[in-house]
Image (cartoon, grey):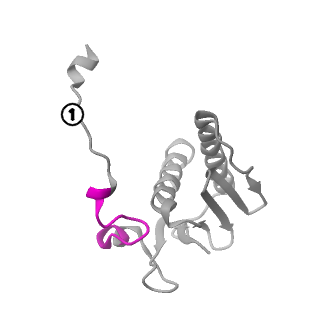
Amino acid sequence: RGYRLLLDFSRSFLPIGAFQRLICLVVAQAAVFSRTFESYSLEAELYRNCAFVEIEPGFKLFLQEEIKNHKIYVRIPSSKHAARGCRMIAAMVNKLNCDVMGEGLKWDLLVEDTNRSTNLVPYQQAVKQKLFPWFEKDTKSTLPKSRSINLDSFLS
């Protein structure tokens, strides 16, 4: 099962090749993690309109393109990785839009509202409601303490 998010390009269109470029970015991210941390993760399973990629051990993504409806569905099996996966996919689509599409892509990001059985809600609504698993309700307990850094001494 897992947690769903949707990239809905139906306001305009999903260009040919955009899904494949997104998959390349996801696979590249998995490769970077594997090299950096010398960890083993499953090889990506790639098909014509879907892919299953393990970014790092336990952090898996299933992506599926729905060509006729101009949509990309993403399923993240673990609630532990849902927020990070959503941010990562959104950043990658933004990168594609800026680097390849000349900022011409238009899409809506929707995430699953786990309080309702099958509803997807706009990302901005999820932000306001701090919907689980996309956001933590108590960020104080989950974020590490940060230290002040003197950037003046760093830059000189």
Q: Is residue 71 magenta?
A: no
Single out the residue that lies furthest toward the right. 47
Q: Is residue 21 above or below residue 133?
A: above
Q: Observer-nearest residue: 112 or 93?
A: 112
Give the SS element for disc 1: loop
Looking at the rendering, the stretch of residues picked out in magenta corresponds to 126-141
| 76 lies left or right of 115 | right
Give residue 75's quadrant in the image.
bottom right
User: Which amino acid lies under the numbered mark 1 shown in the image of this protein?
Assistant: Ser
| 79 lies left or right of 61 | left
Image quarter where the C terminus lies is top left
Q: Is residue 139 magenta?
A: yes
Single out the residue that lies furthest toward the top. 156
* x 67%, y 66%: residue: 64
Q: How many marks?
A: 1
Q: Is residue 151 above or below residue 31?
A: above
* x 47%, y 67%: residue: 108
Q: Which residue is mark 1?
A: 148
Q: Position of residue 44 (x, y in %)?
A: 73, 52
Q: Is residue 144 visible?
A: yes
Q: Position of residue 36 (x, y in %)?
A: 58, 34
Give residue 131's quadrant in the image.
bottom left
* x 65%, y 62%: residue: 63
Mark 1 crowd level (few <14, some 14–19, many ≥20, 10 Å Cα): few
Image quarter where the N terminus lies is bottom right
Single out the residue that lies furthest toward the bottom. 117
Q: Position of residue 113 (x, y in %)?
A: 44, 78
| 97 lies left or right of 30 | left
Q: Is residue 106 visible?
A: no
* x 66%, y 52%: residue: 23
